[in-house]
Image (cartoon, rainbow, N blue to C red):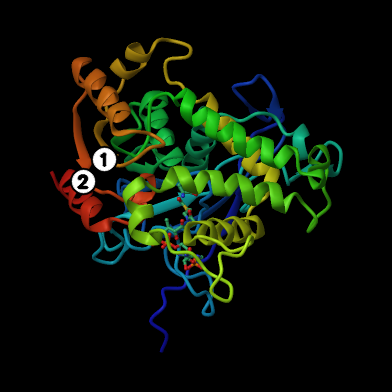
Amino acid sequence: MSEKLLVQTRHFQLHLGEKGFFLESGRILPEVNIAYETYGVLNADRSNVILICHALTGNAHAAGYNHESESKPGWWDAMIGPGKVLDTNKYFIVSTNVIGGCHGTTGPRSVNPATGRRYNIQFPVVTVKDMVRAQWLFVKQCFHVEKIHTVIGGSLGGMQVLQWAISYPSKVERAVVIAATGRISPQAIAMNKVGRQAIMRDPNWKNGNYPDGAGPVDGLGVARMMGHISYLSYDSMQRKFGRDFKKTDGFYDFFGEFQVESYLDYNGYNFAKRFDANSYLYLIKAMDLFDIGMDNGYREVLAAITSRTLVVSIASDILFPAHESRELYQAMSEEGVDVTYHEMDSDVGHDGFLVDYHLLVPVVESFLNA
Ligand SMILES: CC(=O)SCCNC(=O)CCNC(=O)[C@H](O)C(C)(C)COP(=O)(O)OP(=O)(O)OC[C@H]1O[C@@H](n2cnc3c(N)ncnc32)[C@H](O)[C@@H]1OP(=O)(O)O
Ligand SMILES: N[C@@H](CCO)C(=O)O
């Protein structure tokens, strides 16, 4: 018998009535489909829901295997399962793909019901607030849940968690904000700019109207390389790659590569096979626009949070540096929020929340069990 936990990605169409889904931008999506997975069992009083929010290029497939031949499990399988920190014997874990994504939830590659054609860059700009509102409608409509035990996620997922606590304070009992920030820095926007330009300058981008299977793979691959540089750290690059160089016949061939280049090539190329370029553009835009204080003031919105909150940073994170999380924690704490802060002493960089589980699990565990 197989030991693989087989799970299924399902789809739910939000009940929006004739009005559609109003976005922060003022534009409207006539329909929104949500791709989701669940693990564990919803209890009788519907009080054991943990919602997982994924990062930039994640999807609803957070744990288990979608089919027998899948070689790697969902992206947070180390965290989710029987006896794991997000214990499926105890909790009903829900994971959705964000609005604007390309793994089953409505996004730029979806067909616009008004035209019968893909939205491409006619898709409206979506924000983290929109992502979270879609998730709230989803859990309410699909599972009739009125309160969520815990919302948890890293990076863009952490921003969603923070937004949950701000938008729906009475609905979220606990919030775990990992490797995130309350407002994205100019440095992070600059890195996204490079990625955006790489995609949009690729001749195959065609103003976003590329045919299926012939998109801007080179541009998207380069964008992902930029991303990976920000997900690693000085120390992790030293350790992983050093200055190893692949010589050709003993020579430093012009096209010969350092290991770090080979890594970026491999991961850039692979990424372009699994992700839609337009979706990437929309999701980095959502990230760039994220600033909890944009409308009502940074401290004012934090002061309204009533969820018990854990803020986790990664010491070597160069994308959302730990001092941004400390600033967030400090402000929440001064505004009277029940908040705890933990800095993971990890040297692997931003992606530490996907790698250094021995540092992350105990913190989340003690927060959930407190
Ligand atoms: C919610 C979410 O965040 S979901 C999205 C998360 N997933 C991603 O970001 C996808 C990209 N994956 C990764 O970056 C990593 O696999 C992580 C962060 C998930 C885990 O990091 P690590 O365990 O340190 O993996 P590592 O960075 O060593 O390897 C990543 C890949 O590069 C390959 N690689 C490593 N070194 C080299 C090299 N010198 N040359 C070429 N390829 C290399 C690995 O073989 C691995 O390939 P695989 O994905 O086919 O297995
Ligand atoms: N590496 C992760 C985290 C980036 O924030 C991802 O691609 O989603």
Mark 1 or 2, nearer chain start: 1
Q: Quadrant of the C terminus?
A: top left
Quarter of the image holding residue 248? bottom right
Relative to 36, say whether 206 is above or below: above
Which label sits on residue 185? none
Describe residue 115's horizontal placement relative to residue 60 as left or right: right
Who is closer to the viewer here, 224 or 260? 260
Q: Is mark 2 within 8 Å of ligand 1?
A: no
Most foreground residue, 173 or 289: 289
Point out residue 195 in the picture as x, y percentages from the top left corner.
Answer: 61, 39
State the quadrant of the N terminus.
bottom left
> Residue 213: image x %, image y %?
78, 59
Q: Are marks 1 and 2 in contact (CB under 8 Å)?
A: yes
Q: Secondary structure at mark 2?
A: loop
| Residue 315: mark | 1
Is 330 in front, or is 239? 239
In the rendered view, would you say 295 is above or below 144? Answer: above
Q: Amino acid at mark 2?
A: Asp
Q: Residue furthest bottom?
A: 1
The image quadrant of residue 75 is bottom left
Name the residue carrying label 2. 345
Please indicate, yes or no, whether residue 47 appears anywhere in the rendered image. Answer: yes
As measured in the structure, the alpha-carbon distance from the residue carrying label 1 to the one carrying label 2 is 6 Å
Residue name at image x 42 percent, y 23 percent: 183
Label 1 is placed on what type of residue? Ala
Q: Is residue 370 left or right of residue 321?
A: left
Please count the marks in the image. Answer: 2
Q: Residue at x 70, y 29 (%)?
A: 124
Residue at the image position 38 percent from the left and 43 percent from the top: 154
